[in-house]
């Protein structure tokens, strides 16, 4: 338990800083290309360091499922996140995206027929209320389509979590992480190539350093922790800690980027955070929803 708690803190810090790194990188290069290079660095790092532990699944079904997981967890998530943060602050982006634990509950009820106890119902109400407050405050200032893109990213991330928990439980963590990233690379590149223009003049020391951080620590290492936790723990038992990601992001954004959001945004974040915390309460034993997948 202590090990998992420490891993969750490390994961939250790594991912919280990612939002700042992306915001700075957007000064130099377009968002989709940034995410492409982030994934590329992660693939190269995992292959160099952990290639002996990578075992490609033999069945076509398993490989298709890994691509689908990468579609939700990397391609759509990273893509819409990058586009969305292009119009929003790093802290607000993190708050919207990390409503995903609450979205997981709603989707699990629909997709997995997962029962809702009173805590989960309250968390859904609080999460929705927090979102309404944030969106309302942004409408009063200036509504940007980026908020919608960020919400799409959160939904995609949530779908990836459910998909992994249901279909990928029997594949080792390193293989899942490497293969999802590898299979996502071509799609990420094509999306960027046909919609954005790469400016090689932005490749300075700062930009390269941030991309290396995002690729190695913020993606390769962080996803290894994330997948391992989801494979060996109940979703509800770790979901409550993910409010720490936007918490780290908000604090770092204020200190480093001097970002200022409206009071309504912070109120919405607090309400969403309480909702996420409630997802871990009142957990009961559930029927096994894991479908075994042969490698």
Image (cartoon, rainbow, N blue to C red):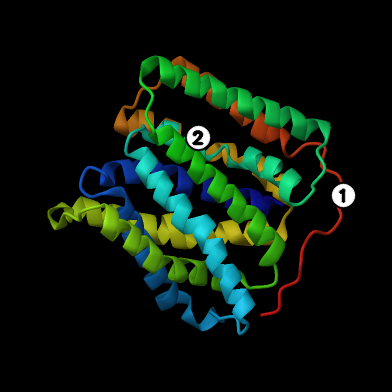
Residue drawn where x is 32% and y is 53% of the image: 32
Side of 193 relative to 56 (left or right): left
Query: Residue 204, how many percent across, how many down?
Result: 16, 54
Q: Answer with left or right where residue 216 lies relative to residue 72.
A: left
Quick check: 218 above or below 264? Answer: below
Image position, residue 163 (x, y; %): 65, 58
- The label shown at residue 75 is none
Pointer 1 or 2: first along the chain:
2
**What's the residue at 71%, 79% (across, down)?**
294
Asked if the residue at tag 2 contacts the one at tag 1, i.e. Cβ–Cβ closer than 8 Å, the answer is: no
Badge 1: how crowded within 10 Å, few (<14), some, or many (20+)? few
Closer to the camera in the image, 293 or 111: 111
Q: Measured from the top left, where is residue 254 in percent x and y?
A: 37, 28
Task: Check the picture and name the quadrant holding the C terminus.
Answer: bottom right
* Label 2 environment density (alpha carbons within 10 Å; few <14, some 14–19, many ≥20): many
Asked if residue 18 shows in the view, the reply is no
Asked where in the image residue 33 lies, by quadrant, the reply is: bottom left
> Which residue appears farthest toward the left when viewing the image?
201
Could you say which disc has been placed on residue 96 in the image?
A: 2
- Cα separation, mark 1 vs mark 2, equals 30 Å
Camera-side residue of 149 and 260: 149
Residue 285 numbered tag: 1
Residue lying at 61% horizontally and 85% vertically, measured from the top left: 58
Residue 74 percent location from the top left of the image: 47, 57
Q: Residue at x 32, y 39 (%)?
A: 86
Q: Secondary structure at mark 1?
A: loop
From what the image shows, is residue 93 above or below residue 165?
above
Asked which secondary structure carries label 2, the reply is helix
């Amino acid at each position: 338990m202590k090990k998992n708690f420490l891993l969750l803190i490390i994961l939250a810090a790594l991912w919280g800083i990612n939002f700042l790194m992306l915001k700075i990188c957007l000064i130099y290069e377009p968002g989709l290309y940034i995410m492409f290079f982030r994934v590329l660095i992660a693939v190269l790092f995992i292959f160099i360091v952990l290639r002996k532990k990578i075992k490609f699944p033999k069945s076509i079904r398993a490989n298709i499922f890994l691509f689908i997981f990468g579609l939700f967890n990397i391609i759509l998530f990273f893509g819409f996140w990058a586009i969305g943060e292009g119009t929003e602050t790093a802290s607000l982006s993190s708050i919207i995206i990390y409503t995903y634990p609450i979205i997981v509950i709603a989707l699990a009820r629909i997709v997995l027929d997962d029962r809702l106890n009173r805590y989960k119902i309250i968390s859904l109400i609080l999460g929705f209320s927090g979102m309404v407050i944030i969106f309302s405050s942004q409408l009063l200032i200036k509504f940007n389509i980026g908020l919608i893109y960020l919400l799409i990213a959160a939904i995609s991330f949530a779908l990836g979590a459910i998909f992994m928990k249901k279909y990928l439980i029997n594949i080792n963590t390193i293989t899942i992480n490497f293969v999802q990233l590898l299979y996502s690379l071509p799609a990420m590149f094509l999306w960027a190539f046909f919609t954005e223009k790469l400016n090689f003049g932005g490749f300075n020391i700062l930009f390269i350093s941030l991309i290396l951080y995002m690729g190695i620590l913020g993606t390769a290492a962080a996803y290894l922790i994330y997948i391992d936790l989801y494979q060996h723990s109940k979703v509800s038992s770790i979901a409550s800690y993910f409010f720490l990601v936007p918490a780290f992001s908000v604090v770092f954004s204020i200190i480093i980027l001097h970002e200022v959001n409206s009071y309504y945004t912070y109120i919405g974040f607090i309400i969403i955070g309480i909702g996420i915390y409630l997802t871990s309460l009142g957990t009961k034993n559930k029927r096994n929803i894991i479908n075994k997948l042969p490698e």
